[in-house]
Amino acid sequence: MFLMSTPEIHEIVNYQLSILHSQQFTAMTQSDPLQEPLIPDEIDLLEGFFLSDLPPSGSLSSLEMVEGYMTALVVGPEVVEADDWLPYIFDQEGHSEPSFVSDDDAVMIEELLLRYMNTVERQFNDDPDGFSPLYEQFDYGDEEAEMLAIQEWALGFMVGMEMKNESWKPLFANESTGMLGLPMLMLSNIAGDKVTLSEEEIADMIELMPEFVVKIYHFWKLM
């Protein structure tokens, strides 16, 4: 996506927030604004926010990671309320919160995250088989950046599973369904050198991950 210094990102995020505040979401036409998909400028704003120093150190650190996390919650075994999943983005231990210049900025970021989650949920409600993760929708410019995005998406998915790990246990009760979590597990651990895969095995895991996410969704729907 893009690389900038932290001060530059911080300045851009604050500027974009001020612009969005001034517009007051006048482009929204739906009766419920939280159901409105994000426009490209808002996606850029969220990406810049997670790359800045505003989130605490324990926060999910990229938009790919956030989408992976949201996807796990949407396709998972139980409904997770926003009061639970929103704070978990920023600190899985529940001790830290993001730093905002104003309460209005905090509300703005929260609304963008709620709308993003609603978009992910709507995708699976309306067309689960058409699901395409964020990293498939961008040109990252080089293979290393793309691989990092894929790893972060997988890691975010694992964070979402861990949030409700007890509820996920039936998926792993037998080998055939338990294998559905393998791509996310393997790809999320490559960066930490916990897993050694060949290039061919990595390519296979990447290809299988969206398909297996959809199968996980259907698994829970049949339960």
Image (cartoon, rainbow, N blue to C red):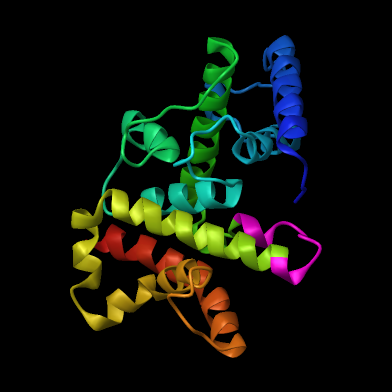
Residue 140 forms part of the magenta stretch:
yes
**Compared with residue 95, is residue 202 higher up or lower down, i.e. above or below?**
below
Look at the image and tell me whether residue 128 can be seen: yes
Look at 66% across and 40% down and name the residue there: 47
- Residue 200 x/y as whole percent: 59, 89
Q: Is residue 20 left or right of residue 163?
A: right
Q: How many marks?
A: 0
Residue 145 forms part of the magenta stretch:
no
Q: Is residue 200 left or right of residue 125?
A: right
Residue 89 found in image quarter: top left
Q: Is residue 218 left or right of residue 191?
A: left
- Residue 129 x/y as whole percent: 51, 63
Look at 53% across and 68% down and name the residue there: 191
Read off the magenta span: 134-144
Residue 206 found in image quarter: bottom right
Q: Closest to the observer: 157 or 75?
A: 157
Quarter containing the C terminus: bottom left
Look at 48% across and 75% down and name the residue there: 193
Residue, far right: 141
Q: Is residue 109 left or right of residue 71?
A: right
**Compared with residue 213, is residue 4 higher up or lower down, i.e. above or below?**
above
- Residue 142 x/y as whole percent: 79, 67
Look at the image and tell me whether residue 76 can be seen: no
Q: Closest to the observer: 108 or 217?
A: 108
Look at 53% across and 33% down and name the residue there: 55
**Compared with residue 156, is residue 101 higher up or lower down, i.e. above or below?**
above
- Residue 71 x/y as whole percent: 45, 52
